[in-house]
Image (spheres, rainbow, N blue to C red):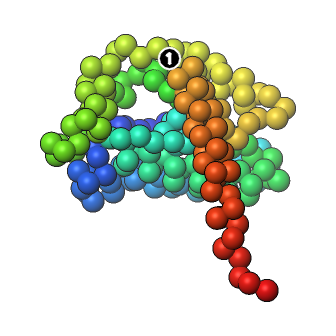
Amino acid sequence: MLVNNAGRTHVGAAEETTDSELRDLFDVHVFGPAALTRAVLPHMRSRRTGAIVQVSSMGGQMSFAGFAAYSATKFALEGMSEALADEVRPLGIKVLIIEPGAFRTGLFGNHSASTPIPDYADTAGRTRQMIETSAGTQPGDPAKAAAAILSALDAPNTPLRLPLGDDAVDAILSHLDSTRTEIHAWEKLARDTRLAD
């Protein structure tokens, strides 16, 4: 089993985030897991068994002000993992994407932040303040998260994605509902882009 769990958070509006900050985050959240996955797959393929757990975030399904860079990396990790799951499922290898909400870990206490631009004080600035004041008060229990991950891996039909925590489940379901509503509202225009016969 491989668990790609290394991670850190970064707070900053998209405009505030430098190329260097963005690349550093992609190195940790995308290129690191990709390299480790490539390293273990030959052994898993030869045995026709194995599991790869990608620790993403509820931010891998949705994003909000201040988390542009962080969510970009988690979206990328999820896209890569979704394709990976299709590729290795016939070889007996499971892929499980974990999408936790706020858990009582050191993530918020070990974050980087971009230099603030005053115009974003009411958007990305609120996220910055939330991260700085909520470390150590998150509702999620890491031990229960680990148990849930093991239960999902032991299940006959391991899910591709597993959100963890009330906040993650509620936010992702709300986001999916909002996305469906928006697609339906613009469906006619979207479908009218076919070439004329």
Q: Residue at x 69, y 70 (%)?
A: 192
Q: Which residue is mark 1?
A: 140
x, y percentage for residue 125? 24, 35
Q: Look at the image and tell me whether residue 21 can be seen.
A: no
x, y percentage for residue 71? 44, 45
Asked if 118 appears above or below 193 in the picture, the reply is: above
Residue 96 vs residue 2, the one in the foreground: 96
Quadrant containing the C terminus in the rendered view: bottom right
Q: Residue at x 68, y 58 (%)?
A: 187
Q: Residue at x 45, y 42 (%)?
A: 63
Task: State which quadrant residue 49 falls in.
Answer: top right
x, y percentage for residue 95? 68, 43
Q: Is residue 49 left or right of residue 125?
A: right
Q: Is residue 188 left or right of residue 117?
A: right
Residue 69 vs residue 62, the one in the foreground: 62
What SS does tag 1 mark?
loop
Residue 178 vs residue 53, the one in the foreground: 178
Q: Look at the image and tell me whether residue 59 can be seen.
A: yes
Bin the neighbour count of mark 1 within 10 Å (Cα to Cα): few under 14, some 14-19, many 20 and up. some
Quadrant containing the N terminus in the rendered view: top right
Asked if 19 appears above or below 182 in the picture, the reply is: below
